[in-house]
């Protein structure tokens, strides 16, 4: 179950457009498991050795870079987002609503 769930999370994360972010909860809701945001976080934590999973584009529901300590270097997550045109101040995405991408909800 866990591996399949993680792979479903990665499928959604791979769809996040450059310059956009989404939240753990939005991914969970899109998967039809609205209460599993924490499991999405675990999937993102395990994603660093998996190809083409832009984990830096997943933040908490307020736009905070809560997963940044899982990236090599102290500011890698922020640098990756800034390279895509997203401004980050004090670990918070500026204009979060403007950059937020809502995954399609699974029917």
Image (tube, rainbow, N blue to C red):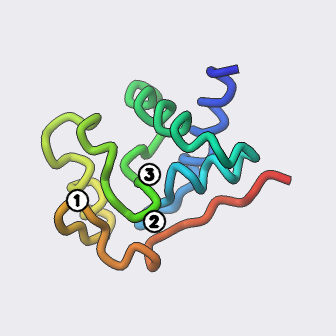
User: Which-is-in-front pick, marks 2 and 3?
Assistant: 3
- Which quadrant holds residue 5? top right
- Density class for disc 1 (Cα within 10 Å; few <14, some 14-19, many ≥20) is some
User: Which-is-in-front pick, marks 3 and 1?
Assistant: 1
Q: Residue at x 57, y 38 (%)?
A: 10
Q: Which mark is residue 20?
A: 2
Q: Residue at x 40, y 64 (%)?
A: 62
Left or right? Give the position of 48 relative to 105: left
Q: Residue at x 51, y 38 (%)?
A: 38
Would you name the residue on which mark 3 appears? 58
Q: Earlier in the sequence, mark 2 or mark 3?
A: 2
Q: What kind of element bears circle 2?
A: loop
Q: Is residue 100 above or below residue 44?
A: below
- Which quadrant holds residue 26? bottom right
Q: Percent position (x, y) of residue 51? A: 46, 32
Would you name the residue on which mark 1 appears? 91
Q: Is residue 6 above or below residue 83?
A: above
Q: What kind of element bears circle 1?
A: loop
Q: What kind of element bears circle 3?
A: strand
Q: CA distance from mark 2 to mark 3?
A: 9 Å
Q: Residue at x 28, y 34 (%)?
A: 70
- Density class for disc 3 (Cα within 10 Å; few <14, some 14-19, many ≥20) is many
Q: Nearer the viewer, residue 13 or 68?
A: 68
- Density class for disc 2 (Cα within 10 Å; few <14, some 14-19, many ≥20) is some
Left or right? Give the position of 87 relative to 56: left
Q: Percent position (x, y) of residue 29? A: 68, 52
Q: Percent position (x, y) of residue 88? A: 23, 67
Q: Percent position (x, y) of residue 14? A: 55, 47
């Amino acid at each position: 179950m866990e591996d399949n769930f993680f792979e479903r999370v990665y499928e959604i994360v791979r769809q996040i457009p450059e310059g956009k972010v989404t939240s753990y909860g939005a991914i969970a809701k899109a998967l039809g498991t609205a209460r599993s945001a924490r499991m999405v976080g675990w999937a993102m934590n395990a994603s660093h050795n998996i190809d083409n999973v832009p984990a830096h584009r997943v933040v908490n529901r307020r736009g905070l870079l809560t997963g940044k300590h899982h990236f090599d270097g102290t500011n890698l997550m922020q640098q990756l987002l800034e390279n895509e045109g997203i401004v980050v101040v004090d670990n918070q995405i500026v204009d979060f609503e403007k950059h937020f991408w809502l995954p399609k909800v699974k029917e």
